[in-house]
Amino acid sequence: MKFRGLTRLAAFVLASLSASLTHADTPIRWAADTESGAPFVFQDPKNPERLIGFEKEIIDGVAKRLGRPGQFVQNSWDGLVPGLERGNYDLIINGLEITEERKREIAFSTPYYITAQQLTVLKGTQGIASLEDCRGKKVGTLKFSLAHRMLEQFGGIEAVTYEAETNAYADLEHGRVTAVLIDAPIAQYLAKPNPKLELVGGPIGEILYGIGIRKNEPELVAQVNQALADMVRDGELRRIYDRYSLWNPLMAKAFKDPGPALEGPTMYEYFLNATQPNRSRTMGERLELYQSFLPILAKGAVTTLEISVAAMCVAVLFGLILALVRLYGPKPMQWLAITYVELIRGTPLLIQLFFIFYALPHLGLKLSPFFAAVLGLGLNYAASESENYRAGILGVPRAQSEAAAALGMGRRQTLRYIVLPQAIRIVIPPITNDFIALLKDSSLVSVITMVELTKLYGQLASTYYDFLGTGILVAGFYLLLGLPFVRLARWVEVRMSLQPGTQIDQERSWMGAARTRAFAWVRRPSQASE
């Protein structure tokens, strides 16, 4: 009996040790949006391939105390919570305010940072120092943020929302909005160093930042809370805030730490020296900076190309099926094809991507970001391609089909040898145009955690305050991606055309070859009828 008890104890210990080791190898996946992400999580201005930020250091400390490697997942700000619920990652840390609405959807760690909202205006603006002074005026803010909700609840203020904070401050400089209301850390990093802008008024409200976690993982919540408590106790959290110059009276009161800084603001000064908007760069410095962008943009270009080519293959094949069903299928199938085309063309692509990526998992179908992007773009463009094919098929003179029937060819042979070769040649130009459009529409897949060219442009431009030069560089990448396919489409179109030259020219063309096969089929007496 005693031996059996020891055996069970040993088995339990071994199982626990094995589970612990396995869990330690599993990365803790955390998500944030690095576009205009200073000081939270953003690209190092001197090394764009490296992430820095006070939240990056916090999550590194948490992961270290959990005994698990950290793994970053890029996601758009407005998709962070849906992505967490979908299971794309384990944690959110991106200046996520703890609100009652969000607490109904996800769980939060204990607050790791406390701050307030900050109002910013153009330098020298008179008469605006509070939200009351903003009544009847346009005020910019970050979409779906606590500041956005605050402006709507305050009343009398027209809230103008932005995907990225840098765009809000840019519109303030251009006079499109009267003021900007955003979290104080963002204002300190993006507005305070700008000589054209001015922070006015005192702190507005109180904001608590917490790490977002799924509700069904109370054990992980407890582990994260313990890790944060350990970082507070050993002073690591305070040193992080000191390095980024983010320690404030609210934090001193909450953490009961009114003492002097433990470290100098080294990271804040590093950021200012590298990214100040008024800092002019020489042409050599700009060229060196753009050269450092090339490897990053090249990776984004490969991702964009892979998604676009795969999606276009889906669109072309499925579009052809839809067109054939609509023209030659039984009535119920025809109506089904018509309904699909009108439904897809009548709803936004962005909504379709959200539905495929975030809604389908609730029905048991969970796709990877890449396959969701390919499926969303492919099914959307298939509706357009089906109309191109339908127009091409109807554009083939009816007399040719009648002549084929007179020769004894059935509908299948007529489509294969007579109609489709000519229809495909007709639709090559619009299909090429659609591919170029799809190439550009692939920028929408950033909402489902895919990082492609356009998303990289936003990240780099907002980090270096260089929307012009970076934009030209990204536009060049798109041009280089699209031009070869335009040339290829033109070459295929010429090859498929029936040239009015020699018999060799006819035989070398696709249509000439198709016609030759059709005549060969007609000459076979055993296949005189279908």
Image: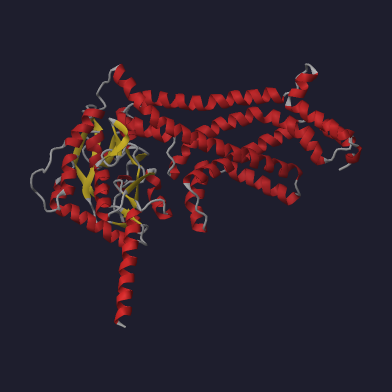
Tell which residue pokes out farthest to the front in this image.
3
Quadrant where the C terminus sits is top right
Residue 410, horizontal then vertical, whole percent = 84, 40
Residue 500 lies, with reference to residue 42, above or below; the image says: above
Tell which residue pokes out farthest to the left in this image.
259
Q: Residue at left 24%, top 37%?
A: 187
Q: Residue at left 17%, top 36%?
A: 266
Residue 347, horizontal then vertical, whole percent = 55, 44
Q: Nearer the viewer, residue 286 or 195?
A: 286
Work out whether residue 470 can be spotted: yes
Residue 191, horizontal then vertical, whole percent = 24, 33
Q: Nearer the viewer, residue 24 or 10?
A: 10
| Residue 131 location, quadrant | top left
- In the image, 250: left or right of 312? left
Tell which residue pokes out farthest to the bottom in this image.
1
Q: Nearer the viewer, residue 509 or 438?
A: 509
- Number of numbered tags placed on the structure image: 0
Quadrant where the N terminus sits is bottom left
- In the image, 419: left or right of 271? right
Residue 388, horizontal then vertical, whole percent = 66, 34
- In the image, 454: left or right of 65? right
- In the image, 245: left or right of 108? left
Display colour scheme: secondary structure
Q: Nearer the viewer, residue 519 or 243?
A: 519
Work out whether residue 177 can be spotted: no
Tell which residue pokes out farthest to the right in this image.
525
